[in-house]
Amino acid sequence: MTDATFEDGAERPILVTAVDADDLGVISAMVQDAVLPITEMRWEAKSRRFAMLLNRFRWEDREDAEQRGRPYERVQSLLVVEDVTKVASQGIDRTDSDMVLSLLSVAFEPGADGTGRLVLTLAGDGAIGLDVECLNVSLRDVTRPYVAPSGQVPQHGD
């Protein structure tokens, strides 16, 4: 058995789960530069689930798009975190329903006995912290890919 590669999902919806830091690194790479309206985040305290509906850049398709001369794509995906006990945010105005967030990375800060904090770093010095009983994260594409509105690969300033 071999590890999955970006190319494995080039023409199929992605479904990836993370139960350890290595798995989470794959998800973090896939959601880098995803954008979402602030209204597309939900914490269901009773079911201990946090979810975001992201418009993610299809990094796994970038090379193929370049080789074939076709447009870059985005796809709507659900990022779901289970076993969440607390949610906190900094640097974002949760009352501004017009705010659009850009997700830069997802990282795990381990605690005692498998617990820890999942940190979703956002562009503009914002962050969302999720205290979790264990690492249980999934990323699932829920729409067909669409042409990236900018037509460009996301860029980061140094």
Image: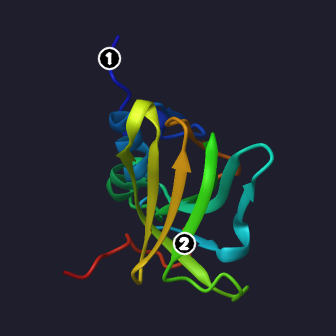
The furthest residue to the right: 46
Say which amino acid is labelled 2. Ser
Task: Give the labeled residue for mark 1.
Answer: 2
User: Which sits earlier in the primary sequence, circle 2 or circle 1?
Assistant: 1
Q: In the picture shown, does residue 48 fall above or below 38?
A: above
* Along the viewing direction, whichever of 50 and 53 lies nearer the viewer: 50
Q: Quadrant of the N terminus?
A: top left
Residue in the picture at 73% in, 85% down: 97
Q: Which mark identifies residue 156?
A: none
The furthest residue to the left: 158
Q: Quadrant of the C terminus?
A: bottom left
Q: Which structural element holds mark 1?
A: loop
Question: Residue 110's x, y, as percent?
Answer: 36, 42
Which tag is nearer the camera, tag 2 or tag 1? 2
Task: Give the labeled residue for mark 2.
Answer: 89
Q: Which structural element holds mark 2?
A: strand
At label 2, counting other C-alpha atoms closer than 10 Å, the crowd grade (few under 14, some 14-19, many 20 or more) is some
Question: Residue 32's x, y, as percent?
Answer: 41, 61
Question: Residue 54's x, y, as percent?
Answer: 61, 61
Which quadrant of the view contains residue 39? bottom right
Residue in the picture at 33% in, 23% down: 3
Say which amino acid is labelled 1. Thr
At label 1, counting other C-alpha atoms closer than 10 Å, the crowd grade (few under 14, some 14-19, many 20 or more) is few
Q: Tell me whether the residue at label 2 lies in contact with that at label 1, contact meaning CB atoms closer than 8 angstroms.
A: no
Question: Residue 73's x, y, as percent?
Answer: 52, 61
